[in-house]
Amino acid sequence: MSTMPEENTRTRPRHAIGFVARRTGIPPDLLRAWERRYGVVEPGRGPRGRRLYSDADVERLTLLRRAVDAGRRIGDVAGMDNAELAALVEEDRRVMVERPGRPAGASPPPGTSAQAGAYLDAALAAVAALDHVGLVEVMDEAAVALGRRALRRELIAPLLERVGEDWYGGRLRVAHEHLLSAVLRGVLEPMHRDASLPETAPRVVVTTPAGELHELGALMAAAAAVERGWRVVYLGPNLPAEEIAGAARQAAARAAALSLVANPGNAQTANELRRLRRLVGKDLAIYVGGAAASSYDSVLDELGIVRVNGAEDFPAPPADL
Ligand code: B12
């Protein structure tokens, strides 16, 4: 019986590109482009010239995918060796878990009922099994059992956080997160319509600034705003300042609410906030929230923008409106 030294096993080309794509979450076309442009790995070749990857290649590609998922540009990380990459990925993970205002790990918020905890477990199991119908059923049942506010605070928010951590940790795929986002969008979207609010109720436009694609926090804020007595004009995510200002003007809104989730401390987002304030003048109240909001505190102070911690803390319309 021949034994192969461990290093040879790790570097032996033996995995086809389809397997590597599934294992790393990098689609084959993207993987080939990364090889061509950045030389991220050099696969061996099989009998008919087909690419074959080693265990070491798979390990390196997994690290690269995690760095990119954390917001790094492939061109910035492709030249790093595996030890540097592993350190970077670990640093990004720590920053994300320990971000200000975010509890370490993904534990449910204080005061969460055992019932909400059970729904959280059931929802996580449905996401992991890609069980779309099962997830919708859990959310429908939980909405009745918990009520809208606890549904958002005790189930939806920790569920997103948990799936985010598992996605980042490589335990769930992008597809799991997309399935969850699609279902939650459907659950949250109707919550900001309230036909019983008078036409004259003060209006707030709700959106996210250009470059921010995370919209579920904005939808949660919109749902809470309606419950405080605001009439919500929901604009969807990713809007430039000019569009937010134009919509606020047309709707005669008294406030704009923006969600900032990814890209903490991003210069483009800070400039969008500055442009928005310039365009709307001093009279429009601007509220921001979301996991990245506190990273803009000095800009918010400079612009008189109010940061709100949780969606459920959405301010009531000021008495003079
Ligand atoms: C779903 C999701 C996506 C989906 C979003 C789908 C959708 N339709 O919204 C998609 C696929 C688009 C996505 C893309 C990306 N994502 Co993403 N995503 C998530 C996930 C799982 C949930 C995000 C979410 O909705 N959070 C909303 C709520 C639940 O969180 P919150 O910000 O704490 O908000 C609370 C309050 O602050 C308040 N609130 C929020 N907004 C507002 C606004 C106001 C006015 C008020 C009053 C209150 C309020 O409401 C919430 C409940 O109280 C998170 C994981 C996580 N831990 O959040 C990652 C996460 C945010 N994503 C991340 C990353 C890296 C990305 C990508 C860069 C990945 C990539 N390589 O492409 C892109 C960036 C896209 C972009 N430019 O914006 C990182 C961000 C890291 C960082 N820099 O901070 C996270 C943390 C995942 C991780 N652990 O790595 N993502």
Image: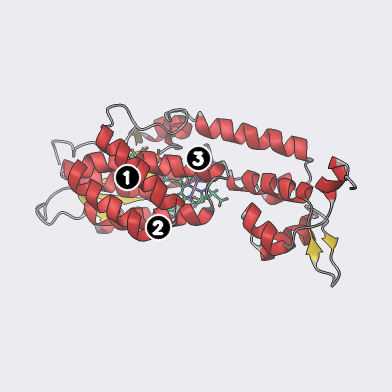
Please name which of the two marks, 1 or 2, marks the residue nearer to the observer: 2
Density class for disc 1 (Cα within 10 Å; few <14, some 14-19, many ≥20) is many
Q: Secondary structure at mark 2?
A: loop
Which residue does the numbered mark 1 point to in the structure image?
257
Callout 1 touching callout 2 (CB < 8 Å): no
Density class for disc 2 (Cα within 10 Å; few <14, some 14-19, many ≥20) is some
Measured along the vertical axis of the image, is residue 256 above or below residue 133?
Answer: above
Q: Which mark is residue 165?
A: 3
Measured along the vertical axis of the image, is residue 306 above or below residue 126?
Answer: above
Instruction: Looking at this view, name the residue that lies furthest to the bottom.
Output: 48
Residue at (34, 60) in percent of width and height: 133
Of marks 3 and 2, which one's residue comes earlier in the chain? Answer: 2
Type of residue at label 3? Glu
Q: Quadrant of residue 185?
A: bottom left
Residue 250 visible in rendering: yes
- Estimate the spatial distance between the alpha carbons at disc 1 and disc 3, rounded to whole Å: 26 Å
Of marks 1 and 2, which one's residue comes earlier in the chain? Answer: 2
Measured along the vertical axis of the image, is residue 285 above or below residue 65?
Answer: above
Please name which of the two marks, 3 or 2, marks the residue nearer to the observer: 2
Q: Position of residue 102 (x, y in %)?
A: 43, 30
Type of residue at label 1? Ala
Q: Which mark is residue 131?
A: 2
- Estimate the spatial distance between the alpha carbons at disc 3 and disc 2, rounded to whole Å: 19 Å
Closer to the camera, 284 or 295? 295
Q: Position of residue 249 (x, y in %)?
A: 28, 55
Residue at (15, 41) in percent of width and height: 321
- Estimate the spatial distance between the alpha carbons at disc 1 and disc 2, rounded to whole Å: 33 Å
Q: Is mark 3 within 8 Å of ligand 1?
A: yes
Of marks 1 and 3, which one's residue comes earlier in the chain? Answer: 3
